[in-house]
């Protein structure tokens, strides 16, 4: 199926056609990654409202930058899947597509006649990916879920923040983003499986599953020791010194994650006695005596500025860094060098800056611009004409 747009990035997924029935973030983030890797993504949207994210801020002159950031480079066809004429168009698209992605509650697509079983029998090469709150099995499978609900259920909020402080949501939608990442991995794995065997498969992604998968250390700790982890601020549960430290003017991060790095840190701090202290000889003993060690390190660091200490730590090869705000992170020279801020446009043509593609693959250019996000139904006429031409 030939794209109606020729400005999509080239990538290893060039030639793959993805029908994207998802909205807001988890599904659209998955299809954004697939589009960045070269796939042609066609958003199938409700003609009345389109993707809910079109109404989410921040806005530039009335247009959603949120929507543009996650849906750049996609095409949009507005279809009412309850109308026979629109179902006919959709089914023509299904016959040409490689992947369908949706994030409705389980059962919704079945009611429309487009569930996995129905589509697999009619389109046996179509990979079907469903991203929902809880997956397609289990007692919660039909329960509604938003990012914050899953952050709470998945335990990640319980280990975020400082002891005794109010419970806090992680500052980004990690529930949706995690599900989108796992969905992208699942889709590509299913495509690889199809390439080898000819068999298309159903990819079932639950946001709660993805949150649990991201709970590496806390989950391992509870499952194998019975200890229930809680929030630790900037400290690591089993690596010391590894956290946030004061200096003479502002806080910095130091991650001396092994015995060799700790000795180097002691040398930078001009604290040879600390390196020989029996309480601090191993990572295990340092972790047992973390409060005393942090107090000693902090007292020394307060004698000079963050910039001075970071220069010394860098020269010694000790992982360390400042605590940037969003401005500092996005204006960092490494961010620019890696093309992690790129330019795209809203459906109305307003230029906006968004985050680039973190997946760098040799042989495929990482351009400083991306195609615009689509207006609702923008490509319907062109896609219908394309389908009509291909059936003649």
Image (tube, helix red, strand yellow):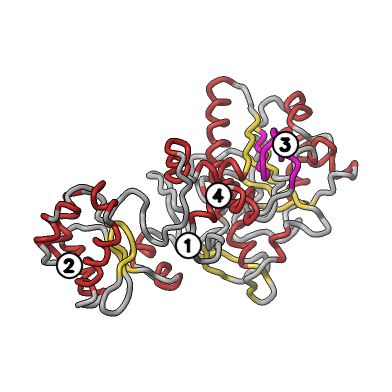
Query: Is residue 231 shown left or right of residue 238?
Result: right
- Residue 50 in the magenta stretch? The answer is no
Checking the image for residue 155, the label placed there is 4
Query: What main secondary structure does the magenta stretch of the protein show?
Result: loop
Dot placed on the residue nearer the N-terminal end, 1 or 4: 4
Crowding near the residue tagged with mark 1, few <14, some 14–19, many ≥20 C-alpha atoms within 10 Å: some
SS for tag 4?
Answer: loop
- Residue 39 seen in the current view: yes
From the image, tell me which residue sits under label 2. Answer: 312
Dot placed on the residue nearer the N-terminal end, 1 or 3: 3
SS for tag 1?
Answer: loop
Query: Is residue 140 shown left or right of residue 296?
Result: right
Crowding near the residue tagged with mark 3, few <14, some 14–19, many ≥20 C-alpha atoms within 10 Å: few
Q: The magenta stretch spans which residues?
A: 128-143
Q: Please identify the residue farthest to the bottom as the structure is shown.
A: 249
The quarter of the displayed image where residue 113 is located? top right
SS for tag 2?
Answer: helix
Residue at image coords 46%, 57%:
231
From mark 1 to mark 4, how far is it between C-alphas? Answer: 13 Å
Crowding near the residue tagged with mark 2, few <14, some 14–19, many ≥20 C-alpha atoms within 10 Å: some
* Residue 43: image location, x then y, percent: 70, 50
Checking the image for residue 161, the label placed there is 1
From the image, tell me which residue sits under label 3. Answer: 139
Q: Nearer the viewer, mark 2 or mark 1?
A: 1
């Amino acid at each position: 199926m030939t794209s109606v747009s020729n400005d999509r990035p080239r990538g290893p997924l060039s030639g793959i056609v993805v029908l994207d029935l998802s909205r807001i973030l988890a599904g659209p983030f998955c299809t954004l990654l697939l589009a960045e890797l070269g796939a042609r993504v066609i958003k199938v949207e409700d003609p009345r409202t389109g993707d809910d994210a079109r109404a989410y801020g921040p806005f530039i002159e009335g247009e959603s930058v949120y929507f543009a950031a996650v849906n750049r480079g996609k095409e949009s066809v507005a279809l009412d899947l309850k109308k026979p004429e629109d179902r006919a168009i959709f089914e023509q698209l299904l016959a040409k597509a490689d992947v369908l992605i949706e994030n409705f509650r389980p059962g919704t697509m079945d009611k429309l006649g487009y569930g996995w079983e129905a589509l697999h029998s009619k389109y046996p090469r179509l990979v079907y990916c469903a991203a929902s709150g809880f997956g397609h099995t289990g007692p919660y499978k039909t329960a509604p879920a938003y990012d914050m609900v899953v952050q709470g259920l998945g335990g990640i909020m319980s280990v975020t923040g400082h002891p005794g402080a109010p419970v806090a949501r992680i500052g980004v939608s990690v529930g949706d983003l995690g599900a989108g990442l796992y969905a992208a991995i699942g889709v590509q794995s299913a495509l690889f499986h199809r390439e080898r065997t000819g068999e298309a498969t159903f990819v079932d992604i639950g946001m709660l599953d993805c949150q649990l998968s991201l709970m590496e250390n806390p989950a391992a700790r509870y499952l194998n020791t019975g200890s229930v982890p809680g929030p630790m601020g900037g400290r690591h549960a089993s690596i010391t010194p590894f956290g946030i430290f004061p200096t003479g003017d502002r806080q910095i991060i130091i991650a001396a994650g092994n015995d060799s790095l700790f000795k180097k840190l002691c040398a930078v701090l001009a604290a040879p006695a600390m390196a020989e202290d029996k309480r601090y000889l191993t990572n295990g003993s340092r972790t047992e005596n973390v409060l005393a060690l942090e107090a000693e390190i902090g007292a020394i660091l307060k004698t000079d500025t963050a910039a001075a200490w970071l220069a010394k730590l860098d020269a010694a090869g000790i992982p360390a860094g400042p605590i940037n705000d969003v401005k500092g992170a996005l204006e960092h020279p490494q961010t620019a060098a890696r093309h992690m801020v790129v330019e795209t446009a809203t459906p109305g043509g307003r230029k906006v800056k968004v985050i680039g593609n973190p997946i760098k693959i040799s042989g495929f250019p990482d351009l400083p611009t991306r195609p615009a996000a689509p207006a609702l139904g923008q490509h319907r006429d062109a896609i219908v004409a394309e389908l009509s031409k291909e059936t003649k």
